[in-house]
Structure formats: structure tokens, C-alpha cells
């Protein structure tokens, strides 16, 4: 089965739907033959020779690709000329913007072809590796900061030098979705002070974990922008007004504003007005990522960088294409996973029972299948059960029985010990019971976030156990010696295991060298 990679025809599009690396994987792992148009990757710095080395067959003309490949991978939707070459049964994959391009879908359907809109892959955990929209938004967020840094006439990080003190730049990010979080990470990485706002308060923790400040809105109602789909909903006019008052205050204080606020399928809300831009200091920058959907800023000119009263306003909507090498690699990898999900070369099929494939398929066997049935995606934190309802009745009942049995066994043991009338045994037993209660209380209610410090405490306790075990192991009493040896052994495992687990956890937070 043949996969074709034509050169993108839209002016200014530098990305390509497969890189030499993803081409090799399509051939070696999925069993496809890959046809690549000459110069297809040139604008993204992938030379033809690299594709050839990866095993691709180079074609001098796109017609060869459209005429021979069963599957055509593209970045943008097919152009007028490309539509004319679509064949019955052929499958085309790309960013097709199905909600805005119904006419395109009907034209593809008329040719009897299939089409998958990669942006329609649902944002569910299983589909993350195919989620090209997130891959591109991540790059756009990064590139937004790079564009801002290029126009901003100061350092991002604060510095104290012999020649004077430079304050850090202050950055406001509006909308903490994929692009917003990437922008926060990049701006923090450059040393700026970053603040962020989003209508979904559940993202506050993510914002804070990246070292930025989350701005809370003083709003009388508890209106929450989150939905079970993980996207925002349209907010009330009162909420938007309150939000804009917050931004008006911030605009006077910050140097850079990056706006990414969007509700899928809706025009972008206007959040930064002309007067807010005019209140910013000269040399400040606004990067409006929502420019293509109308923009979050009133003065944005889509596709252009303008200056308004000394403030640069960036309205590029091709930011991923401005980082073509990386975006092609990530996009190509997303497509590789998509074709893998569809069965590879041998078992390739458009499975309309697979929720990911069904959602992405917008034309199937000459029929328009857009829009797909809704998919429940939950990025929002699940609602916390009310106090007293946290355990299900079955678990609570089971626990109750265990408690009763343990209490009876404890009382019986205590009675037996009292009957022995051995004061020494009784004292030891009392200490043992108290130690169990204290240990239980200390350990049982510790939240998972505190498990690492808890491990240090248990290590200290294990140390004491080892000392106790050594004392007992040295006595003449055979039972005490054996128990002492067992205590030393078990406590040693606890300490060594504790160190091992701690090292593994710390490793997760360490950056890899290089
Ligand atoms: N310019 C480019 O080149 C480029 C490239 C890729 C993506 N984008 C755009 O970037 C934007 C963000 O993409 P994403 O994938 O991160 O989307 P996303 O859905 O993950 O994030 C959007 C965020 O905006 C928030 N939001 C919605 N309404 C808001 C409001 N009134 N106030 C504050 N926050 C609000 C949402 O809660 C959400 O967290 C989109 O507009 C997308 O089209 C632009």
C-alpha cells in the first residue's frame, strides 16, 4: 500500500506531512511504500537525500503521487488543483477545518474519496499520540514567546550588572490551554515573571506548578468555565466584563500579553480592547494567538505584525509553520500513530466503530460524515463526593465487619495476658498497642504528596528498630534472637527500598543532560 507526501501548495506553508524519520517508520514499522514529492521537505530543512536514505521513492511531480498513492498525507486541506486529482477510494488526511469548510467536504465526497480531519481527533488519553492540534498549539505557544522576545527591547530575565539593574519582564498569558501552558513554560524559562488567567479554575494548579501566578477573579457568582469536555464554555457577559476589568489593570502593569482564549467552534472573545493596548508602555508586545478566529485583541490585524501607539501587536496565525522542522516532526509522528491505529499497510481500514477514527473521519466512501457524534472527554477534575458519602455502602459495611472482628480479637488477647498475671508482659503489650495506634495515626492520613518526607520518618523509625533488633538478637532467649534478626532484616529492606524509591522519584524531576 502506498502513502504519498506531496509538497504543500499553500503560499508560506513550510511544514511537510512526513519527515525522513517518520518516513522510515512508516516503511519499516507499518509496511507502507512512501512516495515523496521532490523538495517536499526543503522549507522545513529536510533534504530529498534524507528521504531517499529513509527508503522513500522520490517523485518529480505531485500528479505521480495523487495518481499512485492510496493514502495522501497533507498538512493543509487539498487545493482546487489537488481536488481535481482525488480518486475514488483514495484517503486524504490533513488539517481540513471541517467546521469552516463544509463545501470542501462535499467536493471530496463527490470524488468518492475518504477524508480524515486531523484536528477532529478527540482530546482523550488514548488519542494523545495522534493529537496534532495539541502538538501544533504547543509549538504556537512556544513560538509566541519567541516572537514577543524578538520585538521586545529588553531582557526577559532580571539582571544586576556593573552597568545597572535590569528588571525582569512581566508577561500575562490569557487562556491556559495547551498553547497557553507552553507560553508560560517558555516565558518562565527565559526568566520572566509570568501571570496567567483562565476561565477554568481547575488549571490553576498547572499554572502554579510551572512557576507562574494564577490570577483569580473577584466575581460574585461561582461561574466556572470548565465543561466535562475539558474545553471552556461561553461565559456570561458579566463574567467577561469582570475579566476585562482585571485585564485593564494588568495591561498597565505588564510588558507582554499573550492571548490564547478560545472556545472551539466559536469566534474568539474580545478581551483586550484598544484602550487597554494604549494603556501599555511603549515597546510592549501583544501576541494574539486567536487571530485566525477573529482575535482576542481589538487591534489585531490577522497575519500581520503592527504597531499601535508604540505597542507591537502580533497576529500571525502560522506560528507552527514558523518552526517548520519541529512541527513537521511532531505532525509526522501524529500521522504515523494515526496510520498505526488504522491497521498499518496490511490491515488498513477506516473503522467507524473506533471512536478516534470515527471522530476524525469527515468523509467516508463518498458520504460526508461530519459532524461526528460527541465524545465525552474529561479533563476537568471529577466532583468531590460530599462529606459522609465518600465510601460506597458495600465498602463501608465490609470495613465495619473487619473492625468488629479486630476489636474482639484484641479484647480476647488482652484478657489472656491479664490472666497470665505477668506484669512485664502486660507492660510490653501496652507499649506495643500504643505504638500501633500512634504509628497508624501518623501514617494512615498522610496525603500522597507527603510520601517522600514520610519515607524519611519511616527510615528513622526503621533505624531504631534495627538497634532494638540488634539488642534482642544478642540475648540468650532463642525466640527473642530470631525475632530480633527478622526485625533487622525487614527494617533493612524498608530503608534500602525507601532510598531506591526516593531516587526514582527524584529522577523524574531531573532534566536529562544534553
Ligand atoms: N497563531 C497560531 O499560529 C496558532 C497555532 C495553533 C493554535 N493557535 C490558537 O491558539 C489558541 C489556543 O489553542 P489551544 O490548543 O491552547 O486551545 P485550548 O482550548 O487548549 O485553550 C484555550 C484556553 O482558553 C481558555 N478560555 C476560553 N475562553 C476564555 C476567556 N474568556 N478568558 C480566559 N480564558 C479563556 C479555555 O479555558 C482554554 O483553557 C486557539 O485560538 C488556537 O486556534 C494559534
Image: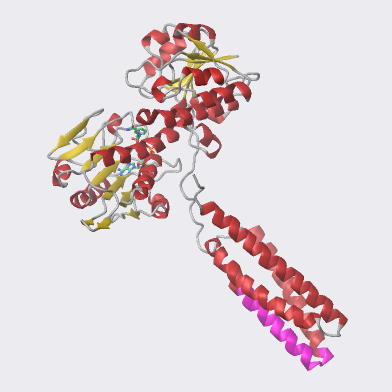
Q: Residue at x 29, y 32 (%)?
A: 267
Q: Residue at x 51, y 47 (%)?
A: 513
Residue 169: x, y in percent? 26, 50
Task: Looking at this view, name the residue that lies furthest to the front.
Answer: 162
Residue 394: x, y in percent? 66, 58
Q: Nearer the viewer, residue 6 or 55?
A: 55
Q: Residue at x 71, y 86 (%)?
A: 430
**Quadrant assignment for ligand 1:** top left
Residue 99: x, y in percent? 38, 24
Task: Looking at this view, name the residue that lies furthest to the left.
Answer: 309
Magenta span: chief secondary structure: helix
Residue 328: x, y in percent? 44, 27
Position of 232 with respect to 507 (left or right) is left
Among the 4 quarters of the image, the one containing residue 262: top left
Position of 400 with respect to 116 (left or right) is right
Up/down of 121 relative to 36, above or below: below
Task: Give the residues in magenta.
Answer: 419-441
Up/down of 275 relative to 107, above or below: below
Question: Looking at the rendering, in which quadrant would you find the N terminus?
Answer: top right
Q: Residue at x 70, y 77 (%)?
A: 465
Q: Nearer the viewer, residue 451 or 101?
A: 451
Position of 27 with respect to 289 (left or right) is right
Query: Residue 339, can we see it?
Result: yes
Query: Residue 353, can we see it?
Result: no
Up/down of 380 relative to 480, above or below: above
425 inside magenta stretch: yes
Q: Nearer the viewer, residue 421 or 49?
A: 49
Amino acid at each position: 500500500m502506498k502513502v504519498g507526501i506531496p509538497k504543500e501548495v499553500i503560499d508560506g506553508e513550510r511544514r511537510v506531512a512526513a519527515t525522513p524519520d517518520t518516513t522510515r517508520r512508516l516503511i519499516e514499522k507499518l509496511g507502507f511504500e512512501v512516495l515523496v514529492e521532490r523538495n517536499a521537505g526543503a522549507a522545513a530543512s529536510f533534504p530529498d537525500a534524507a528521504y531517499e536514505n529513509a527508503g522513500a521513492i522520490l517523485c518529480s511531480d505531485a500528479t505521480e503521487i495523487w495518481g499512485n498513492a492510496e493514502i495522501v498525507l497533507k498538512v493543509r486541506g487539498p487545493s482546487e488543483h489537488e481536488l481535481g486529482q482525488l480518486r475514488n477510494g483514495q484517503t486524504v488526511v490533513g488539517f481540513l477545518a471541517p467546521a469552516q469548510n463544509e463545501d470542501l467536504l462535499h467536493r471530496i465526497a463527490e470524488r468518492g474519496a475518504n477524508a480524515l480531519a486531523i484536528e477532529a481527533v478527540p482530546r482523550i488519553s488514548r488519542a494523545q499520540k495522534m493529537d496534532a492540534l495539541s502538538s501544533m498549539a504547543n509549538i504556537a505557544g512556544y513560538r509566541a514567546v519567541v516572537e514577543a522576545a524578538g520585538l521586545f527591547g529588553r531582557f526577559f530575565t532580571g539582571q544586576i550588572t556593573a552597568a545597572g539593574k535590569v528588571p525582569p519582564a512581566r508577561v500575562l498569558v490569557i487562556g491556559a490551554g495547551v498553547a497557553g501552558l507552553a507560553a508560560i513554560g517558555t516565558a518562565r524559562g527565559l526568566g520572566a515573571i509570568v501571570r496567567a488567567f483562565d476561565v477554568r479554575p481547575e488549571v490553576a494548579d498547572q499554572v502554579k506548578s510551572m512557576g507562574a501566578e494564577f490570577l483569580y477573579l473577584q466575581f460574585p457568582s461561582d461561574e466556572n468555565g470548565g465543561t466535562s469536555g475539558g474545553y471552556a464554555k461561553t461565559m456570561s457577559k458579566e463574567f467577561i466584563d469582570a475579566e476585562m476589568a482585571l485585564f485593564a489593570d494588568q495591561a498597565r502593569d505588564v510588558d507582554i500579553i499573550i492571548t490564547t482564549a478560545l472556545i472551539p467552534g466559536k469566534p474568539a472573545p474580545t478581551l483586550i480592547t484598544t484602550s487597554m493596548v494604549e494603556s501599555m508602555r511603549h515597546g510592549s508586545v501583544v501576541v494574539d494567538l486567536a487571530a485566525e478566529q477573529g482575535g482576542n485583541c481589538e487591534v489585531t490585524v490577522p497575519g500581520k505584525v503592527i504597531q499601535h501607539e508604540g505597542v507591537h501587536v502580533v497576529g500571525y496565525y502560522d506560528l507552527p509553520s514558523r518552526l517548520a522542522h519541529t512541527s513537521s516532526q511532531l505532525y509526522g509522528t501524529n500521522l504515523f500513530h494515526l496510520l498505526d491505529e488504522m491497521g498499518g499497510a496490511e490491515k488498513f481500514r477506516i473503522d467507524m466503530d473506533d471512536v478516534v477514527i470515527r471522530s476524525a473521519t469527515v468523509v467516508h466512501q463518498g458520504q460526508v460524515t461530519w459532524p461526528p457524534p460527541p465524545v465525552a472527554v474529561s479533563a476537568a477534575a471529577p466532583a468531590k463526593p460530599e462529606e459522609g458519602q465518600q465510601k460506597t455502602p458495600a465498602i463501608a459495611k465490609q470495613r465495619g465487619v473487619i473492625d468488629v472482628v479486630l476489636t474482639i480479637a484484641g479484647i480476647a488477647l488482652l484478657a489472656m495476658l491479664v490472666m497470665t498475671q505477668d506484669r512485664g508482659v502486660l507492660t510490653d503489650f501496652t507499649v506495643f498497642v500504643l505504638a500501633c495506634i500512634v504509628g497508624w495515626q501518623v501514617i494512615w492520613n498522610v496525603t500522597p504528596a507527603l510520601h517522600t518526607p514520610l519515607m524519611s520518618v519511616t527510615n528513622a523509625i526503621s533505624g531504631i528498630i534495627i538497634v532494638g533488633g540488634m539488642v534482642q538478637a544478642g540475648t540468650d532467649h532463642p525466640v527473642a534472637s530470631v525475632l530480633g534478626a527478622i526485625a533487622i532484616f525487614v527494617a533493612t529492606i524498608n530503608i534500602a527500598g525507601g532510598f531506591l524509591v526516593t531516587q526514582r522519584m527524584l529522577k523524574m524531576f531531573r532534566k536529562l543532560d544534553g
